[in-house]
Image (cartoon, rainbow, N blue to C red):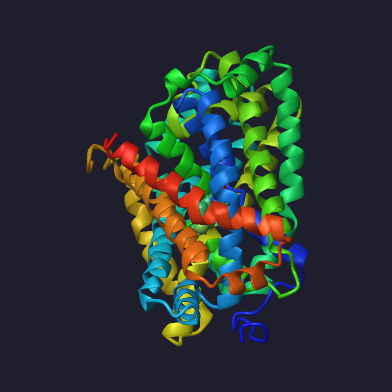
């Protein structure tokens, strides 16, 4: 039945368009901003190794599962889950999994937009030559000034949210597809350039060995949880973003290859960002574990001290904003698709409601860096709390349920038909979603809870 049905929201114009959009969703602040700073906070090599393992053994199979479920359900994740559980003659409470995703997307976007706002404000700083000749101390105070200003953060967060909602309101092919078409290749080129600069710092080897020499004494259960959570976050998994993109995917496209490509590109960008950043960190006597400001306190040093650096600085932060934009649109798309389907309102209205709610929460996040920094819950300010709750808890729980649904609830015949993998690959996939992915998430949770 699902073969002939198309999504009411439209379809991607080609396989390439889907790959671009899904890669656009995956590659974002998670790769360039978050991966380096959490790697720095968790001691480097061993953390990177666990993260890579999680990508391969948990992320990849769940990504194939999400695309497959989305394409079969052809609706927003909530309604897709309802349709698929009916098809599997199972409980329709699986739709709550769709809800979990919509809420996670909304929560992530509220802080994601604030950080993307940092990048926006850095476009202007680069343009006006603020980095020029700057040493580590000057660049740090530039960052501290920005983060300390509630007005600046609110302003840039508002600009970013408005841009996101504008793109989403344009719909699948005119909005989402066009926005992501030209970003990835250019971002890649700038990263290569930064890598080139990192090689000239004299600390390239040290950066490499920080990232690739595993030292397991640096790892505790929270570090493992962070690495696993980040595998979900960076691949946009566990909340229906890839599922909703999968629902716009035409029938004749190979899901397995597509998932491999997306995960590969995403990992490459993260690793490249790390290799570019750590040599600059060490060369300037900075702390790898200095937290969310890491790239904003390191890369401007590079831009400020290379010839023509301001141009590259502008280009880099513009691209970072675009990478964030192509992710943020996928964070809110599940909610918008659901509002359109269930509340029968035009797409534009759905965007306004979803956008306003996210914007409001984002303001609280912006304030948590300055005037509300003393307000904490479980010892975490609003930003840390939202990040922990979503990346470390909601996405892995969502991913666990998706794996269980794809592996145990869906009929084998249906998943086989939709995935169209060669037999051995299908069996490996099935083994990973039935056993490895759910068990890994479960064990990490037990470990964090201190059960063993
Ligand atoms: N994958 C994005 C990044 O790495 O920046 C963030 C993200 C987008 C997470 C979409 C989850 C999601 F559904």
The residue at 73%/38% (across/down) is: 190
Residue 40 shows up from this direction: yes
Q: Which residue is drawn at 61% across and 30% down?
A: 274
Measured as percent of width and height from the top left, residue 304 is found at 65, 25
Q: Considering depth in this image, is 283 or 53 the residue closer to the camera?
A: 53
Query: Could you tell me residue 400's position as x and y percent?
Result: 44, 55
Q: Which of 185 and 134 is in front in this view?
A: 185
Quarter of image, res 94: bottom left
**Viewer can see residue 29:** no
Say whether residue 113 is left or right of residue 19. Answer: left
Where is 321 relative to 43, above or below?
below
User: In this image, 441 relative to 174: left or right?
Assistant: left
Residue occupying image coordinates x 60% and y 51%:
60
What is the x, y in percent for residue 255? 69, 63
**Quarter of the image where the C terminus is located:** top left
Quadrant of the rendered image containing residue 284: top right
Eyeballing the image, is 50 above or below 114? above
- Examine the rendered structure and indicate whether residue 332 appears above or below residue 62: below
Q: Please state if 145 lies on the left or on the right of 281 as rendered.
A: left
Q: Residue 194: give x, y in percent of width and height.
A: 71, 30
């Amino acid at each position: 039945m699902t073969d002939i049905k198309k999504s009411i929201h439209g379809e991607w114009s080609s396989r390439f368009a889907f790959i671009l959009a899904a890669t656009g969703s995956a590659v974002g602040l998670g790769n360039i901003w978050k991966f380096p700073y959490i790697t720095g906070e968790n001691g480097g090599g061993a953390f990177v190794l666990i993260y890579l393992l999680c990508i391969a053994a948990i992320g990849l199979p769940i990504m194939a599962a999400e695309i497959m479920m989305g394409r079969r359900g052809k609706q927003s994740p909530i309604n897709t889950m309802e349709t698929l559980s009916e098809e599997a003659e199972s409980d329709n409470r699986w739709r709550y999994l769709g809800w979990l995703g919509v809420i996670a997307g909304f929560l992530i976007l509220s802080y994601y937009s604030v950080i993307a706002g940092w990048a926006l404000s850095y476009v202007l700083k680069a343009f006006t030559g603020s980095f020029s000749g700057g040493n580590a101390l000057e660049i740090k105070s530039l960052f501290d000034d920005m983060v300390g200003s509630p007005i600046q953060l609110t302003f840039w967060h508002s600009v970013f949210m408005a841009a996101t909602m504008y793109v989403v309101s344009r719909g699948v092919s005119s909005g989402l597809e066009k926005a992501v078409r030209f970003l990835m290749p250019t971002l890649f080129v700038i990263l290569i350039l930064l890598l080139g600069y990192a090689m000239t710092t004299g600390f390239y080897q040290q950066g490499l060995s920080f990232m690739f020499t595993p030292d397991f004494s640096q790892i505790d259960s929270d570090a493992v949880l962070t690495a696993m959570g980040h595998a979900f976050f960076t691949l946009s998994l566990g909340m229906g973003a890839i599922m909703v993109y999968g629902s716009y995917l035409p029938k004749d496209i190979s899901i397995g290859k597509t998932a491999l490509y997306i995960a590969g590109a995403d990992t490459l960008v993260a690793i490249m960002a790390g290799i570019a950043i750590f040599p600059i960190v060490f060369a300037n006597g900075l702390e790898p574990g200095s937290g969310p400001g890491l790239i904003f306190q390191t890369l401007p040093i590079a831009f400020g001290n290379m010839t023509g650096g301001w141009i590259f600085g502008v280009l880099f932060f513009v691209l970072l904003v675009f990478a964030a934009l192509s992710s943020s649109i996928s964070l809110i798309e599940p909610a918008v698709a659901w509002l359109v389907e269930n509340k029968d309102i035009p797409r534009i209205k759905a965007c306004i409601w979803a956008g306003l709610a996210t914007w409001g929460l984002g303001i609280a996040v912006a304030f948590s860096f300055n005037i509300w920094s003393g307000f904490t819950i479980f010892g975490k300010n609003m930003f840390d709390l939202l990040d922990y709750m979503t990346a470390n808890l909601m996405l892995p729980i969502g991913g666990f349920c998706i794996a269980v649904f794809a592996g145990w609830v869906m009929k084998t015949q249906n998943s086989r038909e939709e995935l169209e993998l060669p037999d051995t690959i299908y069996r490996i996939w099935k083994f990973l979603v039935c056993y490895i992915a759910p068990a890994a998430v479960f064990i990490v949770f037990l470990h964090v809870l201190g059960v063993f």
